[in-house]
Image (tube, rainbow, N blue to C red):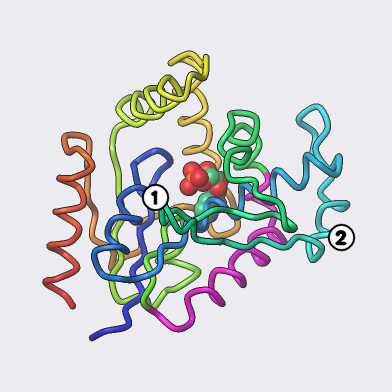
């Protein structure tokens, strides 16, 4: 089979996006980071005062949900996908701790999910995609050709994220990162609407003891054996 849909789900900071990007490149497919959409919606909510002092004006945001335009544009040099929110490059801004702290409560709102899921389904309708997220194999593409569920211990995931922040010169403590990872795990897997869970037919990959390259090799083996 040629035009596969590959769904890569799992907890935050498991390296899903990094591995999905490499796997898509290997297969000459498109990579879609679905988390970037929820992050862009969260940024929009901040920009328009639908989040003030950690309080969310759900009705206000939902009323204007269709004013949000999210696009991914590939950077020709780095081949990285750049996220655009209403025409503005927000790739850096959506990765900040400020957004990470509010993205899970925003992602619980059913109208936000419906909006993002419809966009994801549209972007993936022709196959040849690797999409990473929380509910790709369960809700967005329940018939995906290959489903991977990535896990690793919270401490290891927090450490990876912490080192990433350090490299970027961001002064965020390990405690704060671990707390955010655990909080997002909890909210993402306990929300009522489309929670994070492993699809019955997903293959679980625990990469606590694997680096990025080893994880990619393992997932590529699974993909090639089923292609
Ligand atoms: O993948 P990333 O960690 O950037 O996702 C940020 C947040 O977006 C997650 O913690 C989750 O709350 C939400 N999300 C989601 N469903 C997806 C992808 C992300 O709810 N498919």
Residue occupied by mark 2:
63
Judged from the image, the secondary structure of the residue bearing numbered disc 2 is helix
Quadrant where the C terminus sits is bottom left
Residue occupied by mark 1:
17
Judged from the image, the secondary structure of the residue bearing numbered disc 1 is helix
Task: Please say whether residue 190 is visible from this viewpoint.
Answer: no
- Determine if the magenta segment contains residue 114: yes
Q: What is the C-alpha distance between the residues marked 1 and 2?
A: 30 Å
Q: Residue at x 35, y 59 (%)?
A: 8
Is residue 49 toward the left or the right of residue 198 in the image? Answer: right
Please give the range of residues in magenta.
106-127
Give the main secondary structure of the magenta stretch: helix
N-terminal label among 1 and 2: 1
Residue 5 picture location, percent across and down = 36, 75
Looking at the picture, tell me which residue is in the foreground, 151 or 82.
82
Q: Residue at x 48, y 81 (%)?
A: 125
Is residue 24 toward the left or the right of residue 208 in the image? Answer: right
Q: Determine the image quadrant of residue 85.
A: bottom right
Q: Residue at x 35, y 56 (%)?
A: 21
Q: Is mark 1 within 8 Å of ligand 1?
A: yes
Q: Nearer the viewer, mark 1 or mark 2?
A: 1
């Amino acid at each position: 089979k040629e035009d596969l849909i590959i769904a890569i789900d799992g907890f935050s900071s498991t390296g899903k996006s990094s591995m999905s990007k490499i796997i898509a490149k290997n297969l000459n497919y498109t990579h879609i980071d679905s988390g970037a959409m929820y992050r862009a919606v969260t940024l929009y909510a901040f920009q328009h005062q639908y989040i003030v002092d950690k309080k969310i004006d759900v009705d206000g945001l939902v009323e204007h949900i269709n004013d949000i335009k999210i696009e991914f544009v590939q950077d020709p040099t780095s081949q990285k996908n750049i996220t655009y929110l209403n025409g503005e490059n927000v790739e850096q801004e959506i990765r900040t701790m400020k957004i990470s702290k509010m993205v899970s409560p925003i992602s619980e709102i059913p109208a936000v999910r419906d909006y993002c899921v419809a966009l994801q389904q549209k972007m993936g309708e022709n196959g040849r995609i690797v999409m990473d997220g929380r509910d790709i194999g369960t809700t967005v593409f329940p018939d995906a050709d290959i489903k991977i569920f990535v896990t690793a211990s919270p401490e290891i995931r927090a450490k990876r994220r912490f080192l990433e922040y350090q490299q970027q010169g961001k002064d965020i403590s390990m405690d704060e990162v671990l707390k955010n990872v655990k909080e997002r795990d909890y909210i993402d897997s306990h929300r009522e609407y489309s929670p994070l869970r492993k699809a019955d037919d997903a293959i679980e990959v625990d990469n606590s003891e694997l680096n990025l390259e080893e994880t990619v090799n393992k997932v590529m083996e699974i993909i090639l054996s089923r292609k």
